[in-house]
Amino acid sequence: MSETGLHDRTAVDESELVARLRAGDERAFEALVERHYPTMLAVARHYVKTRAVAEEVVQEAWLGVLNGIDRFQGRSSLRTWILRILVNTAKTRGEREARTVPFASLAPEDDEPAVESERFRGADDPFPGHWRAYPGNWQRLPDEVLAARETLDIVIATIHQLPAPQRIVITMRDIQGCDSEEVCEALDVSEGNQRVLLHRARAKVRSALEGHLDG
């Protein structure tokens, strides 16, 4: 099936799903919850203090979905619309806990390096700006090393230590599989800011992995 045909089929399937939700089809709603709950919980966790509160946020967001499904106009995908409701709910709850700052005030600074400057040769070096030591070739490492629990723990720990905007963007893109358009619409950020935040987050995770795998 062509990309256009797949897109049309997806649009038809989504229209049918929305119609079932509007008709009060409980099985359709249960399937929707099962599909999107993990992503919603993962995003909510970045706005509030505990998993328990994040679960409350997700439940509140689902109520918002049910109450608002008649107003869904299909201008974005259903998942994007659901995530937008989730983010707005999580922001409101997070503000009560003094945990969150508006994304607009956390736009990436132009002069923030994605990789530590110490990793490159200085101006007085014969090859200024080049890597001091090139990153290791991870393709040569056995799969079991890359998949080891210790390696995964380092990735998770590094992500948890990222600034909130980077943490949320990399979670949505690389862990939950959202595309850039979904992230931009859900978080109300520009494509450029989303791209920079993701790049910097990935660079920091890669740097942490290099220290672990090449050390």
Image: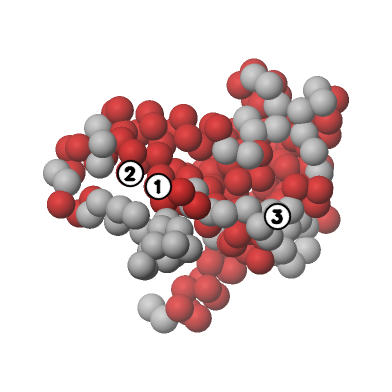
Q: Position of residue 57 (x, y in %)?
A: 72, 29
The residue identified by callout 2 is 210
Q: How many neighbours does mark 1 have within 10 angstroms: few (below 14), some (14-19), or many (20 or more)?
A: some
Residue marked by disc 1? 206
Choose between 58 and 209: the one closer to the eye: 209
Dot 3, crowdedness within 10 Å: few (<14), some or many (≥20)? few
Occupied quadrant, residue 191: bottom right
- Element type at marker 1? helix
**Could you tell me residue 162's position as x and y percent?**
57, 38
> Which element carries disc 2, helix, strand or loop?
helix
- Looking at the picture, how far across and down is residue 65, in whole percent? 74, 43
The mark lying in front, picked from 1 and 3, is 3
| 3D distance between C-alphas at marks 3 and 2 | 25 Å
Give whichever of 26, 160 is nearer the camera. 160
Q: Earlier in the sequence, mark 3 or mark 2?
A: 3
To which residue does mark 3 refer?
A: 109
Q: Amino acid at mark 3?
A: Glu
Separation of marks 2 and 1 at Cα, in angstroms: 6 Å
Q: Which residue is at 40% across, 47% downward?
A: 206
Give the residue drawn at x 54%, y 43%: 171
Vertically, is 189 above or below 174? below
